[in-house]
Amino acid sequence: MGSVSRGIRAFFWILKALILKLTPFRRLLFFLGIAILLLETTDSNNRTLIGLFLLIFLILLELKDKLFARGELEEGRKVQLSLLPEEIPKVEGWSIWLYSQPAKEVGGDLIDFLQISEKSFGVVLGDVSGKGLGAALLMAKLQATIRALAPEFNSLSTLGSKVNSIFYRDISANSFASLIYAAIESKSGKLKLFNAGHLPPIIKRGKSIEELSKGSLALGLADKSHYEEKEIELSSGDYLIFYSDGITESQNAFAEFYGKERLIKLIEKSEPLEPEILGNKILNSVSLFRNDDPRQDDLSIAILKYNG
């Protein structure tokens, strides 16, 4: 197919898609406006003005809806930001930095910090499938479920299975969420975590890098799933890093991905830094790679450093 034919087909495909998005009344306005413009009458000036008026009125109605929807999304963004931890979590013996930024007004990445008891805490990072408002609503539900259940279960394996069962019951088909939950304690480098299909966490011990396993199925893919509780012990100065695919799948103008290898190399070569400084170093590297092109996916990262 030649370029002219492709252009014509693309034009009519876009036009058809736009028309089908209109309500029946607005579809009628559109066809009526076009018909009046094409109608041959002796009073062409009035005919043109009426036809243009109908089309401009239709555009104003659509613009009104878009502005209203944007306002609603801005309110949703404020609510979503209010669900994030209000400040950098403080746990004796640990330095923790959490960061999340949606690609659009709202997003589907989940990052949270829970105080389970006086000495026990939970760090959560997840990624709900999809983008925009639908993903944000599922994220809020998942967050509420975890906050409600986490204090009730000492076993992370049981916690993961229970969260999955509820999430599977309440979501629509083809939706799912990957998730990492880490349980830490003050003054202790021993921690437990379970991974529900999320990107493997990274442990940095000095100059060495260890990548943990991906774990079990993502939440919501099956009614009953088993989640293995993994125990890890960090020494003073070691890091545990979670991240969403908004980092590794960031693309530049040549459609190249930032990639896991580039991320691991940056972490490996970094000198001992506070988690916030290391996190901003990663974010700056991703931004330079993208050359400030718009992000296509939500971006989240959690860095835990054990200070001994």
Image: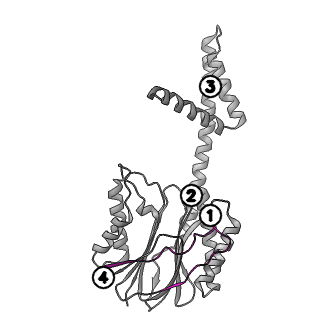
Displayed quadrant of residue 14: top right
Q: Nearer the viewer, mark 4 or mark 1?
A: 4
In the image, residue 124 above or below residue 261: below
Q: Amino acid at mark 2?
A: Gly
Dominant SS in magenta: loop
Q: Residue at x 71, y 68 (%)?
A: 169
> How far apart are labels 1 and 3 at the CA level?
42 Å
Whether the residues at callouts 2 and 3 have beta carbons within 8 Å, the answer is no
Q: Earlier in the sequence, mark 1 or mark 3?
A: 3
Q: What is the spatial separation of the Cα atoms under label 4 and label 1, in whole angstroms?
A: 38 Å
Residue 183 visible in the shown view: no
Circle 2 Cα neighbour tier, 10 Å, few/some/many (<14 / 14–19 / ≥20): some
| Mark 2 → mark 1, Cα distance in angstroms | 10 Å
Mark 4 / mark 1, whichever is N-terminal: 1
Instruction: From the image, tell me which residue sits under label 4.
Output: 206
Contact check, label 4 and label 1, Cβ < 8 Å: no
Extent of the magenta region: 205-232
Q: Residue at x 31, y 77 (%)?
A: 273
Q: Position of residue 149 (x, y in %)?
A: 64, 80
Mark drawn on residue 237:
none
In the rendered structure, which amino acid carries the disc numbered 3? Phe
**Residue nearest the observer in this picture, 188 or 81:** 188
Question: x and y percent of residue 266 in the render?
Answer: 31, 69
Q: Quadrant of residue 175?
A: bottom right
**Residue denoted by label 3:** 53
Mark linked to residue 138: 1
